[in-house]
Amino acid sequence: ETRISSIVRESVMDLDPFYPIVDSSNWIDRLVPLGIKLVQLRIKDASEETLRREIATSQATCRKYGCQLIVNDHWCLAVDLGCDYVHLGQEDLADADLASIRRAGLRLGVSTHDGAELDAALSVKPDYVALGPVFPTSSKALSWKPQGLEKIEGWKRKIGDLPLVAIGGITLERSRDVLQSGANSVAIISDVTKNSTPDQRTLDWIAETQDWR
Ligand code: TZP
Ligand code: MG
């Protein structure tokens, strides 16, 4: 393989096909040593001090195990602490300093739920876009009805090689359909963290998505 083609391949295929979204560094310390290569830390309500500590602890664990860390919302701290990715919703895009995120070498992912949001996301040249909710979910209150697998196909046709993350109501049993529809990665909350055996479930996810890795 030439150097150029491996660089191209890397930019397209860099997102692991599976990542859990968790709300604490405790979860990161538990799941990352199992062998996941990507994880999102999504903390909605916490003091600045707690957030900084949680992100720093998560980042240290991720570094140790060669896992990439996506920080939801808190781009300032993610930049400060040298994380890998920032994930922003549409409502966050106006406030975030995208230039400083880029300057610090962080990559950017953006949530989308409809065509207008996809256009808005593409206009900031993200490193991936997320589409959700693919299926019904109780992990986040959303006004969009489930998008279905066809929407994944449509998004992928429109964005080409830009990585696509699918989120919302995805279970291990439905993961192949979602990846076959064109998602490059699936982001999972409840199927992992609400499972009765989250560690085994994580190992099952790693195995189930191996063909896409
Ligand atoms: N954004 C769109 S759906 C969703 C988020 C954060 C929740 C996904 O959680 P689950 O439990 O995997 O459906
Ligand atoms: Mg947000």
Image (cartoon, rainbow, N blue to C red):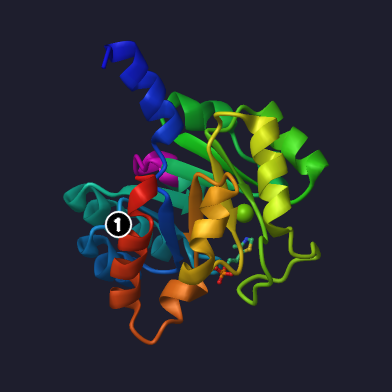
For label 1, the residue is 36
Q: Position of residue 66 (x, y in %)?
A: 22, 47
Residue at (39, 46) in percent of width and height: 212
Picture residue at 75% right of the left edge, 35% below the top: 120
The residue at the far bottom in this view is 196
The magenta stretch spans residue 79: yes
Residue 72 visible in this rendered orientation of the protein: no
- Name the secondary structure under disc 1: loop
- Name the one closer to the observer, 148 or 86: 148
The answer to whether residue 6 is above or below residue 14 is above
Q: Would the CB of label 1 be found within 8 Å of ligand 1?
A: no
- Give left or right: position of 187 versus 67: right
Above-or-below relation of 106 to 31: above
The boundaries of the magenta stretch are: 78-84
Q: Is residue 65 magenta?
A: no
Amino acid under disc 1: Ile
Find residue 145 and report its image quarter.
bottom right
